[in-house]
Image: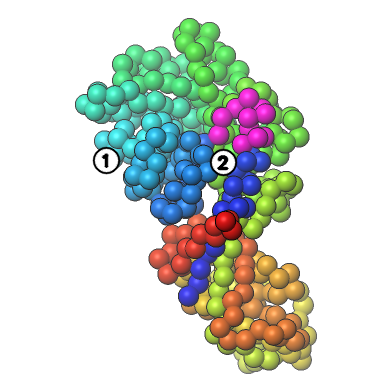
Amino acid sequence: MNRITIDLDALEYNLNVISNWVEGHGATLTVVTKALCGHRETLEALRDLGVDSMSDSRLDNLEVVRDVAPDVETWYLRPPHSSALDDVVRLANVSLNTELEIIQELNDEARKQETVHRVVVMIELGDLREGILPGRLLQTYKNIFELPNIRVIGIGANLGCLGGVVPSIDQFMQLALYRELLELKFERKLPLISAGSSSSLPLLIDGSLPRQINHFRVGESVFLGTNLIQGGFLEGLRSDAMRLEAEIVEIKEKGMVPLGETTEMTPFQPLEENEETDPGQRGYRAIVTVGQVDTDIGGLTPVNESYKIAGASSDLTVVNVGEVKEGLTVGDRIGFRAAYSSFVRLMANPYTEKVLLRPAS
């Protein structure tokens, strides 16, 4: 069976490093847990590691967070939908919003539940995902400030989530100016600018991120150590907190090029070829028990850098392990690093075992 291992030593290390970066900036951190897909044991581990603010885009997952960590602050990351506002108010302390009509409905629901719901209003800054247009800012906030069961705690933005926009100093300064304008216009304090993310950590590390950006929503770099701007991994973070292990079901010496006529009409898009292969070349090929149904195979990289993924079908992946099999045999496991797209699908996949590696006592 495939399994993804979650190394709590590595996870704690990354959490501590990123928390220190954020605190040194005078900001606060909310850990984005949506890639965990509500995995109870890992959420419990985050709670035990001292995480006091978690966020998710699935209400079912927030239900689990509420159950395992009732004192943790919860954020709902997806713009709320009308059919589930009762659950949004019940499960999330804070939600990210873009539609005035929805915020008005949240106010009505918060009144029914005898609570005050906190919101961050998202502003569109070029990534073309969610966010109100800057020209609607003043009128939108004027209407929100009149709602008795809604408390606006700040403004926010998403960058690098859809259009691949690289966060820039100018965009962050825009947010700072928008907050200043709103505070002067309405004489209300907006404590947070929630725009920090995994993609803005490089700016935080090199000291160029404006101080006004004082709230971070970070998930990918916590779990994978990823550098979303330069590629690879952020210096100072570990990349081994999450590993996929897939079992070898066959290992044989074979040719490296298919025989006969080939076609592009395959069920799944072929993986990109990394190197030229001599038609007469032979080597050992290991077939492992993970396939395109399980995850995004294109986002997997063998931990052993000499291994190369040759291709994958729905249920199996072929790995070229070299001219010698180096002791590998049927039943052994091959380890893979997973990109975010692969990691989240593995966590959502019921066929993948999730195993926590705890520190030796």
Q: Where is residue 59 in the image (x, y as percent from the top left)?
A: 35, 44
Describe residue 118's horizontal placement relative to residue 205 as left or right.
left
**Segment tinted magenta in the rendering:** 19-29
| Label 2 secondary element | strand
| Residue 261 visible in this rendered orientation of the protein | yes
Q: Is residue 231 above or below residue 130?
A: below
Looking at the image, is 119 positioned above or below residue 274? above
Front residue of this view, candidates 227 and 269: 227
In this figure, which residue is indicated by the disc labeled 1? 83
Query: How many numbered circles does the render carry?
Result: 2
Residue nearest the viewer, comparing 157 with 26: 26
Is residue 313 visible to us here?
Answer: no
The reply to whether the magenta stretch includes residue 26 is yes
Residue 229: x %, y % from top left: 69, 45
Question: CA separation, marks 1 and 2?
Answer: 28 Å
Q: What residue type is labelled 2?
A: Val
Q: Where is residue 144 in the image (x, y as percent from the top left)?
A: 38, 19
Q: How is the image coloured?
A: rainbow
Q: Would you name the residue on which mark 2 appears?
A: 218
Residue displayed at 65% across by 66% down = 301
Instruction: Tell which residue pokes out farthest to the left in this image.
Output: 112
Q: Which residue is drawn at 68% across and 67% down?
A: 303
Q: Which of marks 1 and 2 is nearer the N terminus?
A: 1
